[in-house]
Amino acid sequence: MRTVLIAAAVSVICALFGTPLYIRFLVRRGYGQFIRDDGPTSHHTKRGTPTMGGAVIIGSAVIAYGLAHLITLRPPTLSGILVLFLMTGLGLVGFVDDFIKITKQRSLGLSATTKLAAQVVVAIIFAALALQTDDGTPLRPASTSISFIRDTAVNLAFAGPAVGALLFVIWACLMIAGASNGVNLADGLDGLATGTSVLVFGAYVLIGIWQSNNSCTLRPGPQCYDVRDPRDLAVVAACVTGACIGFLWWNASPAKIFMGDTGSLALGGALAGLAITSRTELLLLPLGGLFVLIALSVIIQVGYFKLTGRRVFRMAPLQHHFELAGWGEVTIVIRFWIIAGLFVGLGLGVFYAEWVVGS
């Protein structure tokens, strides 16, 4: 528990005091956000605001993870390192995308195909390594079984280990792409994606601690959790939670800096990585319910427009629909945070209820 607390504290401090330094660096270099003309007109006042702030979140989380383990003299685990690798790798993809947008002063960075291909490469590396073990133990960071609150009876290795590994890699890629792009779509208003991420990652801190206290290694039984490194996953979640809290101080309206694709892709990847390694893959749907709703609004808008030539929402993603309906930006963000909190409460309630019913 001490490692979790140290990790959270260090990441908050790093992000809180590191972000203004990074802002000054970006301002000196002229790295400001390009605002699309087809978005809400109220956003034009944000043109030039420093972006790529996700680099601070990633850096703060990685530094906090390393220092927390150094201070407590606990070695890092394969699961924790893999989640941080996934977050950093996708963050790098987003950084390149943001950098091209800024330097070229256009709304398109990497092409959609190139961006997706880069995400898939990082996801494949993560998924392949997650099925390995570094100490000869049978328990691996990930499993070929589809998980909800723990592994279910649906095993992708039904036709053999090789087929199972291949199907798992595909499944992991879908999860990672969905989560990273879900957070990316939510990053449209000051503090919206950051504040929502605080809630969801905070939930994974609690889940990791609970799984650790009831692990099959410590307390064998029908309701124990067969997760390889639950306590270290709580440490990783605490690192990202703290980094998001420190960054939110500067990202709240009126934002002094945006996280950009650097942050949104990284945070989505970290969420997917935590879900996979904690064996709570499908539980991510209710926990990240706001991200799911926002992504669905885009899918519905595009699909309905192609079928009928008409729109369901005034603008997608969903937050922009309410902007055009006359809601203030701060009002939308706070109400969406409330919705995100309700979804997180639902997810944690389902997680705990499963344990109570089965015990």
Image (cartoon, grey):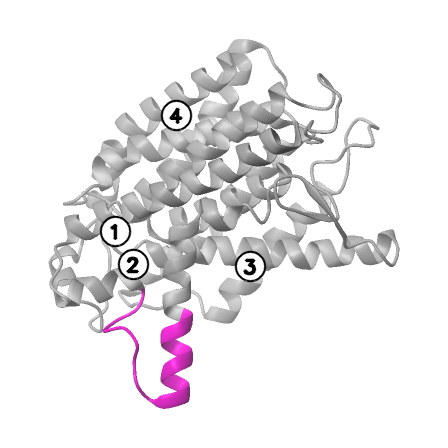
N-term mark: 4 or 3: 4
> What residue occupies the far bottom of the structure in this picture?
308
Closer to viewer: mark 2 or mark 3: 3
Q: Is residue 159 magenta?
A: no
Closer to viewer: mark 2 or mark 4: 4
> Dot 2, how many residues are within 10 Å of its Cα: few (below 14), some (14-19), or many (20+)?
many
Q: Is residue 12 above or below residue 5?
A: below
Residue at x 39% of width, y 20% of height: 10
**Does the CB distance between marks 1 and 2 fall below 8 Å?**
yes
Q: Is residue 285 above or below residue 110?
A: above
Question: What residue does disc 2 label?
Answer: 102
Determine which of the numbered discs, if any, sits on residue 11 in the image.
4
Residue 9 occupies which quadrant of the picture?
top left
Determine which of the numbered discs, if any, sits on residue 118 in the image.
3
Report the Cα–Cα distance between label 2 and label 4.
Answer: 27 Å
N-term mark: 1 or 3: 1
The amino acid type of the residue labelled 3 equals Ala
- Check disc 2 and report its element: helix, strand or loop: helix
Residue 290: give x, y in percent of width and height.
37, 52
N-term mark: 1 or 4: 4
Residue 147: give x, y in percent of width and height.
66, 46
Q: Is residue 184 above or below residue 137?
A: below
Viewer-closest of 89 and 334: 334
Determine which of the numbered discs, if any, sits on residue 31 in the image.
1
> Dot 3, how many residues are within 10 Å of its Cα: few (below 14), some (14-19), or many (20+)?
some
The amino acid type of the residue labelled 2 equals Ile
Q: Could you tell whether 170 is left or right of 33 in the image?
A: right
> What residue occupies the far front of the structure in this picture?
357
Q: Please give the range of residues in magenta.
A: 299-317
Residue 163: give x, y in percent of width and height.
83, 58
Report the Cα–Cα distance between label 1 and label 4.
Answer: 24 Å
